[in-house]
Image (cartoon, grey):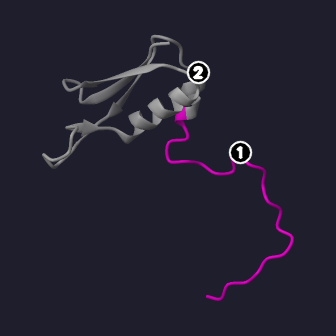
Amino acid sequence: METKIDKNVPIPPKGSKQYKTKFSYLSKIIESWEVGDSVAFEFHRKEFESQSRTSFSAEAQSLISKAKKAGQKVAQRVMADEGVIRVWRIE
């Protein structure tokens, strides 16, 4: 396939939400949840003993990161009996 040069294609403005990240739906949770609310995510067990954590959830980590960027404080706990990692909004 040959690469061609395109002329006069406008550059979209920064932050133009024309793309979606893997967990972009979590932004709606950040906008709507209140103090005391929680969200549960299925967790995955790590397979190697050399890894520091025994379980993880990429979705939970993404929610925590987005909440911190929005100025919200959160807490997370592994609920082994339920098979989930739960994230609470605490402030």
In this rendering, the answer to whether 83 lies above or below 2 is above
Q: Quadrant of the N terminus?
A: bottom right
Q: Which residue is mark 1?
A: 15
In this rendering, the answer to whether 9 lies above or below 46 is below
Front of the two marks 1 and 2: 1
**Horizontal side of residue 80 vs 70, given as left or right:** left
Which residue does the image show at 48% across and 19% down from the upper left?
Answer: 73
Q: What amino acid does circle 1 point to?
A: Gly
Q: How many numbered discs, if any?
A: 2
Q: Which residue is mark 2?
A: 32
Which residue does the image show at 83% across and 62% down from the upper left?
Answer: 10
Badge 2: residue crowd in 10 Å (few <14, some 14–19, many ≥20): few
- Counting from the top left corner in percent of width and height, residue 37 is at 46, 15
Circle 2 — which element? helix
Question: Could you say which is closer to the camera, residue 83 or residue 35?
Answer: 35
Q: Main secondary structure of the magenta part?
A: loop
Which residue does the image show at 57% across and 33% down from the upper left?
Answer: 27
- Counting from the top left corner in percent of width and height, residue 20 is at 59, 48
- Is residue 50 a member of the stretch shown in magenta? no
Contact check, label 1 and label 2, Cβ < 8 Å: no
Magenta segment: 1-26
- Counting from the top left corner in percent of width and height, residue 81 is at 19, 24
Badge 1: residue crowd in 10 Å (few <14, some 14–19, many ≥20): few
Residue at the limit of the structure toward the left, as seen here: 49
